[in-house]
Image (spheres, grey):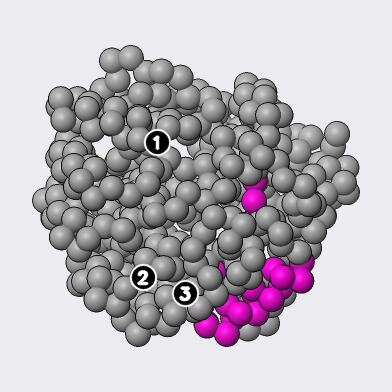
Amino acid sequence: MKLGEKIGSCEFQPEVYAYPTARCYKRLEGFSIAQTEFTNEVNVYVHIPFCRQLCTFCGYLKTLNSEELRRNYVSSLVREIEMYADILGDKKVISLDIGGGTPSLLQPNELGEIMDALKKANRNMLGTAKEASIEATPESVEYDKFKEFKALGINRVSIGIESFADGEIRMSGRHNLGNASSNAIKTLKEIRFGNIVCDLMIGIEGQTTKTFSDSVDALLGLDPDTVEVYALGVIPSTVIGKRRPEGLMGNRQKYECYEIARKKFLENGYFQSCHNRYSKLEDGGYVQEDAVFKGISLIGLGAGARSYAQNVHYRNAYDGLDGRAAISRYMGKINSNGLAVETGIFLSEDERMRRYVIGNIESLDMRAFSRAFGIEFGNAFPELYKEMLSSGCAYETYNELKLTQKGLLFRDLIARQFFSSNVEALESVYRATA
């Protein structure tokens, strides 16, 4: 089926935020950091896999919070940071993101240990990093704790609101009823973080286009700096993936919700900084994601964390079904003075080219593409090039291929068309089980 036909039938694809996808990773034996080729500028990601709740839709590596396990994990994380000190010390760090899980469950002294280790590895990290971010659930936001987080160098907080409809929150296994979400945003504003980011989910169980629109209105009333809107992709290992509830929002309604969000945020002083993000900040609200899309390397630390070097992508100990087992393997490897890397993929020239296109698909500099890969974009992907133009999803300027408003709406579907046959086959098998 051609791109235009897929768009006509409202085919939906979850967000494409990394390529090749982790389904392509294979076991890496005898892997060494010396094999990596990182860019001179790098992003740093730290994974904290602890939660007070296990959301029905979440497929990230996590386990229920345990104070003793969390303390031991932080100690292992500090040791892993030390292993990367030689690499980090030679790089300019442009972003630091602490994700999860729920990293806001860390105590200030635990976050302080992590920040001290990072600054020891790269003493100017907080001077060069444009953002130092931490993820949070609304009910974990406490004034005194987050004031200390800010004092430690955190300037961006990404908070998972997902919905202001209490019924939808309850069905998803979350605890942030509307008042908790509102109060969390107000608390973060009082502390004056430089960027308060709120996530809204499309297609959460029980949601309609009307209740999604109401959630957008509720969030607009709280005026966060940045908003990310993303649609539910059913992951087989999650509660929703196993239960497969009836009545989940259809694809056409998901796209309608994206359009509702776009209209309302643009009308209220936000600009669209990418296909699913709206911000009032000049940098677009998410430095790390934008930098990774542009091809700037990422060094991932912690259980399940992925790293993106120029020549290889790799992942620390991971288990989508048993997070605690993966955390145990991670800590065992690190505490034995070894890397925790288990899987990865060395990138062929073809996969590097596809990764470049997918990361830059919203505004592709075709001259830079030609310089990087020695072939014109139109010759590398002739059919897709024509289809993007003929379907009204893209237009050409002097040397750029840019997505139209329609193209931004279907950005993830377009990105999926650039998957190699190998990656597409692995993804299709995975999605077929959802």
Distance between the Cα atoms at labels 2 and 3?
9 Å
Using the rendered image of the protein, determine whether residue 90 is visible from the camera's viewpoint. Answer: no
Secondary structure found at label 3: helix
Nearer to me, 96 or 349: 96
Mark 2 residue type: Val
Bounds of the magenta segment:
209-233
Name the amino acid type tagged 1. Gly
**Residue 207 x, y percent position in the rendering:** 71, 62
- Residue in the picture at 14% in, 50% down: 117
User: Which tag is nearer the camera, tag 2 or tag 3?
Assistant: 3
Magenta stretch encompasses residue 211: yes
Cβ–Cβ below 8 Å for labels 1 and 2? no
Q: Using residue 221 as the reference point, say whether residue 378 is left or right of it.
A: right
Query: Residue beneath label 1, please?
Result: 323
Per the model, the C-alpha gap separating discs 3 and 1 is: 27 Å
Q: Quadrant of residue 132?
A: bottom left
Q: Earlier in the sequence, mark 2 or mark 3?
A: 2
Q: Which residue is mark 3?
A: 180
Q: Residue at x 28, y 47 (%)?
A: 66
